[in-house]
Structures are given as C-alpha cells and as structure tokens.
Image (tube, helix red, strand yellow):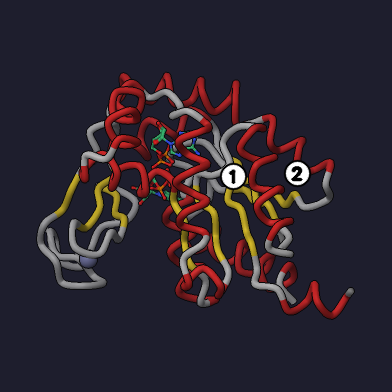
Amino acid sequence: MLDTAKTTAPVLILLGPPGAGKGTQARMLEEKFGLVQLSTGDLLRAAVAAGTEAGKAAKAVMEAGGLVSDEIVIAILRDRLGDEDCAKGVILDGFPRTTVQAEALDGLLEESGQKINAAISLEVEDAAMVTRISGRYTCGSCGEGYHDTFKQPVKDGVCDKCGGTEMKRRADDNAETVASRLEAYHAQTAPLIAYYQGKGSLQSVDAMGEIDRVAGALRAIVETATA
Ligand code: ADP
Ligand code: ADP
Ligand code: ZN
C-alpha cells in the first residue's frame, strides 16, 4: 500500500481569495516540479471565449463576481483531469471553491487511486486584494501574469517569458466585482480550510510577502509533501 501511494502523481491544491497569488505561484511550481497547473478560471474563460454551452451559462456569473455552478465547474475539471498530461501530477488553482466541489474531487481522485498531497492556503489580508487585482494583467500569448506595481516585465509591454507584446486585462478585475468575489470567497470557499485541516492535508503560507518569498515557502512545502 505504502509503495503504491508513493508512486501516484502528486495532487496539490492552492486555496486563497482572488488575487492571493494562486496563478502566479502555480506557474512557478509547474516549472519547478514539472506539474500541470489546472486553473478552473482559465478553463472557464476559454469556454466563454469558445462560446460553448458551459461558457454561455458561466459568462454573466463571472462578470458579476459570483461562483459558477458546481455542476459546470466539476464537469470542466473532470474532463481536463482526464487529459494525458495530467498524469505528471497537478496543481489545482481555484478549484475546489465549495464543499460540493471538494467532495467531488475526493471522489474523482479515489476512482483513479490518487490522493491530495497538500492543500495549501495562501493567507492574505482582504485590504491587499483590491490593489493586487486592479493592477493585474497577463501576456496574451503565454498567459504569464504581471502587475502594474509588483511584477513588471523587464522591458515595458514585452513579456519576459515569450517576448509577446499583447497584454490583457480581465473584464472582472475591477473594484466593483472584487467585493462580490471576496464575499463569495469568505462564504463558500474559506470553509474548505477547515475541510482540509480535518483531513490532515492543510498547509498555510503567509502570502503577504514578496512573490519570491512566498514561492520559497511553497517550494519547501511541496518538496516535503511529494517526497
Ligand atoms: P490569483 O490567481 O490568486 O487570483 P494572481 O496570481 O493572478 O492571483 O495574482 C494577482 C496579482 O497580484 C497579479 O498581478 C500578480 O502579479 C500579483 N501578485 C501575486 N503574488 C503577489 C505577491 N506576493 N505580492 C504582490 N503582488 C503579487
Ligand atoms: P481569481 O482567482 O482572481 O478569483 P479565477 O480565474 O480563479 O480568478 O476565477 C475567475 C472567475 O471564474 C470566478 O470569479 C468565478 O466566477 C469563476 N470560477 C473559477 N473557478 C471556479 C470554481 N472552482 N467554482 C466556481 N466558479 C469558479
Ligand atoms: Zn508571454
């Protein structure tokens, strides 16, 4: 039994409010540990852009800063988890966000004989979120994330990773939706901290520090959790 558990691909969860740094950190962990970042936000935005049924149903909810239905999000996540590249191991960024999603994830992992190595909570103060979210932008070509103040590319307007010059801002990254998104986080997602604590898989990181400092703390946790 112990041997089997050791050889299954790692499953890591990043928990935290909007703007906590989940996407930023997930990409760094992806690079460092050869894992796949699974962001339900990215998957939903792709569905909206492609005009799929799920995308059509999700669009207005996302614009208003609410949570998309568990049914839609779980279906999207389940499909993506089944892709071959996910066999390397995954970092879940923005999923689960409700207890129903967490239970569905437990069921999916059980079916495939996998387990959660760590659910890592990025701890930040609500007051920091507006600044983080309103200054966020990403490279349209590779998705690398930037910030007007906290993470500027070396050359203004040019992506450090891919040289792309088309930078994008999200429609929902404005001061009006931040309040709704934080409310949804506290009401529906924050209870997952106790959920994973109860299962013995919770780890917490102070995410108020600089990006590289947070990354260092996360690396140490992931190294231990996947050893
Ligand atoms: P999330 O995926 O949790 O919503 P992001 O990773 O997109 O958050 O980060 C939100 C914004 O804040 C981005 O513009 C990012 O560059 C910036 N950011 C991320 N981590 C930090 C940090 N530790 N300190 C300051 N800014 C950060
Ligand atoms: P952030 O981390 O900044 O909140 P995301 O990119 O993770 O942004 O999510 C953007 C939006 O997509 C959310 O506000 C929500 O409407 C929807 N969404 C993403 N993941 C989920 C999920 N697991 N459950 C429900 N809605 C989700
Ligand atoms: Zn790029």
**Which quadrant of the figure contains the C terminus?**
bottom right
Q: Is residue 8 left or right of residue 175?
A: right
Packing grade of label 1 (10 A; few <14, some 14-19, many >=20) is: many
Label placed on residue 92: none
Q: Name the residue carrying label 2.
A: 196
Q: Which residue is mark 1?
A: 15
The answer to whether residue 105 is left or right of residue 25 is: right
User: Could you say where residue 180 lies in the image, as x and y percent from the top left?
Assistant: 42, 19
Q: Quadrant of the N terminus?
A: bottom right
Image point (78%, 76%), residue name? 6
Specify the farthest residue to the right. 1
Mark 2 surroundings within 10 Å by alpha-carbon count, few (fewer than 14), some (14 through 19), many (20 or more): some
- Residue at disc 2, secondary structure: helix
Label 1 secondary element: strand
Q: Residue 173, located in which quarter of the rendered image?
A: top left
Above or below: residue 170 compared with residue 33: above
Are dots 1 and 2 in contact, CB under 8 Å? yes
Quarter of image, res 170: top left
Q: 146 and 77: which one is in front?
A: 77
Asked if residue 113 lies left or right of residue 97, the reply is right
Q: Amino acid at mark 2?
A: Tyr
Q: Residue at x 22, y 33 (%)?
A: 171
**Vertical side of 41 occupied by 113: above or below:** below
- The residue that appears at 25% across and 53% down in the rendered structure is 138
Is label 2 within 8 A of ligand 2 (CB to nearest ligand atom)?
no
Q: Amino acid at mark 1?
A: Leu
Q: Position of residue 70 (x, y in %)?
A: 53, 32
Pinpoint residue 50: horizontal percent, then vertical percent.
21, 45
In whole angstroms, how far apart are the C-alphas of marks 1 and 2? 10 Å
Q: Earlier in the sequence, mark 1 or mark 2?
A: 1
109 or 217, which is in the foreground?
A: 109
